[in-house]
């Protein structure tokens, strides 16, 4: 018997901020759409490129999935 793949609980979004011209990330809970982490809103951290933002957000997402108690991982 094969089990259906479970949907991912979190969705990562990286966006260009209009001012200043920097990139930030948000992590959304797919169950309710709530933002559960944001580099800009939570810590005023932004990045010079989208790839830097994705890298930082990916580290944070993995920490969340591990249940890591640390809040920010740069």
Image (cartoon, helix red, strand yellow):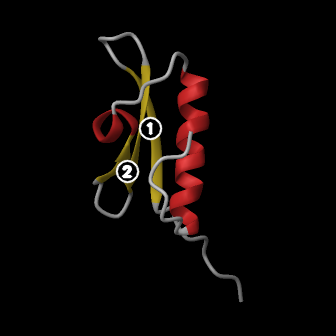
Q: Secondary structure at mark 2?
A: strand
Q: Nearer the viewer, residue 72 or 30?
A: 72
Q: Is residue 36 above or below residue 69?
A: above
Quadrant assignment for the N terminus:
bottom right
**Image location of residue 62, percent across then percent down:** 59, 56
Residue underneath mark 2? 28
Q: Residue at (49%, 58%) from the top-left corner?
A: 70
Q: Does label 2 or label 1 sit earlier along the sequence? A: 1
Under circle 1, the secondary element is: strand
Residue 12 in the image: state x and y as whole percent: 47, 44
In whole angstroms, how far apart are the C-alphas of marks 2 and 1?
8 Å
- In the picture as drawn, the residue positioned furthest to the bottom comes out as 1
Q: Is residue 15 above or below residue 59?
A: above
Residue 13: numbered disc: 1
Count of marks placed on residues: 2
Dots 2, 1 in contact, CB < 8 A: yes
Residue 74 location, quadrant: top right
Q: Residue at x 56, y 58 (%)?
A: 63
């Amino acid at each position: 018997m094969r089990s259906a793949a479970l949907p991912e609980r979190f969705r990562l979004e990286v966006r260009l901020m209009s001012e200043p011209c920097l990139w930030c990330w948000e992590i959304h809970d797919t169950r309710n759409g709530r933002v559960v982490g944001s580099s800009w809103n939570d810590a005023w951290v932004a990045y010079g490129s989208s790839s830097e933002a994705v890298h930082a957000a990916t580290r944070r997402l993995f920490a969340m999935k591990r249940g890591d108690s640390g809040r920010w991982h740069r």
